[in-house]
Amino acid sequence: MTRIAAVVVSHGHARELRESLPALVPQVDELVLIENLPGSVEDVPERAIVLRNERPLTFASNLNQGIAASTAEYVLSVNPDAVPEPDAVRTLADFADAHARCGVAGPRMLWRDGTWQPSRRRFPTVGGTFVRRTPLRLVLRPYQRQRAHYGLDEPADGPVQTDWMLGGFLLIRRAAFDEVGGFDEGFRMYGEEIDFCYRLAKAGWERWYVPAAVVRHRWDAVTDRTLLTRRTLWHWRGILRFVRKHPERLRALR
């Protein structure tokens, strides 16, 4: 079994891949590229496995098929716009090696200008979700009123356990992935990493934020900037699916 594989799903991201792949490829043993939209993968690196979908699949479906096509002990879920700094992948893998119950390890995320991106989060609550995903966020600014959710007052200079992290760049232990059954393919686009980390937590797997590993991530955050798009509807669909699967979270009001 090889050590580290990366799964990258491209849906019209050929331009982003031209920047991210040169930084990623030297750090992994296997690379699986998934062309979820025709023409979105160009200049395929040597040794890469390319999976081309006849029709677009959900992000979770793509991750599952990419992980199934690899053999590594650790698998990276990587967004096309995530560019790892040198040794970021090794730092995450070495940390996981030293922590046997680490199911997921995530890096410090930076915006492209080098400023910190709050990528570690708490599991959602009813009140917090309602504010973040409705026009109330224009008045009750989430980054001001929900600082605990984003960890804004808990700066981490060293590794800390967290509930979940943005799925733009995550190192996943295959044994943990297999134990919980992978990603839930019923999530259209949003929420699959929250559900995955929640199931890991239930199974006793730890989720660690490892700030020594650094990744620059563009992260469009479309649903944060625009009140109503089809992605907003996908997001709410994901929220409702999460609640149906984990109704106990309805008791977490704030």
Image (tube, rainbow, N blue to C red):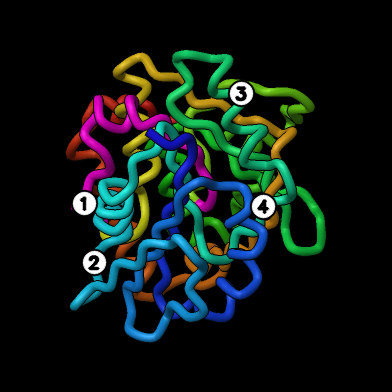
- Contact (CB < 8 A) between labels 1 and 2? yes
Q: Which amino acid does label 2 sit on?
A: Leu
Q: What residue type is labelled 3?
A: Phe
Query: Label 4: how many residues lie within 10 Å, few (<14), some (14-19) or many (20+)?
Result: many
Q: Distance between the residues labelled 1 and 2?
A: 9 Å
Quarter of the view holding residue 173: top left
Secondary structure at badge 1 equals loop
Membership of 172 in magenta stretch: yes
> For the view shown, which residue lies furthest in the bottom direction?
39
Query: Label 3: how many residues lie within 10 Å, few (<14), some (14-19) or many (20+)?
Result: some
Residue at which label 4 appears? 84
Among numbered discs 4 and 2, the one appearing first in the sequence: 2
Membership of 98 in magenta stretch: no
Secondary structure at badge 4 equals strand
Residue at which label 3 appears? 95
Measured as percent of width and height from the top left, residue 49 is found at 37, 62
